[in-house]
């Protein structure tokens, strides 16, 4: 199984290390609070910047 995470950089709210950190914290919070106890395979989500624009995706893929 794989965990894939992609973040596109370059828009006005995704230019600094801080912006990336905030996006990653959002992903970890989602993983910690909403996926607990659920099967990992097939779980996925979007990553948004501070302006609410979608800048990436994360997902669990492959065989377990």
Image: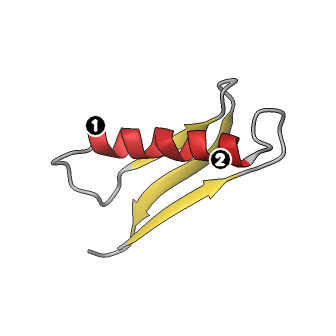
Task: Give the CA distance from mark 1 to mark 2.
Answer: 20 Å
Q: Position of residue 27 (x, y in %)?
A: 46, 44
Left or right: 3 in relation to 36: right
Left or right: 56 in relation to 8: left
Badge 2, how many Cα within 10 Å: few under 14, some, many 20+?
A: some
Query: Which of the marked residues, 1 or 2, is nearer the chain's N terminus?
Result: 2
Between 12 and 18, the residue placed more toward the observer is 18
Residue at 31% from the left image edge and 60% from the top image edge: 41
Q: Is residue 64 above or below residue 49?
A: below
- Residue receiving disc 2: 20
Q: Position of residue 31 (x, y in %)?
A: 34, 46
Q: Quadrant of residue 55?
A: top right
Left or right: 37 in relation to 41: left
The mark total stands at 2
SS under mark 1 = helix
Q: Which labelled disc corresponds to residue 33?
A: 1
SS under mark 2 = helix
For the C terminus, the quadrant is bottom left
């Amino acid at each position: 199984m794989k965990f894939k995470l992609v973040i596109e950089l370059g828009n006005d709210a995704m230019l600094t290390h801080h912006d990336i950190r905030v996006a990653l914290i959002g992903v970890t919070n989602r993983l910690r609070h909403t996926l607990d106890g659920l099967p990992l395979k097939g779980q996925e989500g979007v990553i948004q910047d501070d302006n609410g624009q979608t800048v990436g995706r994360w997902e669990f893929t492959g065989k377990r």
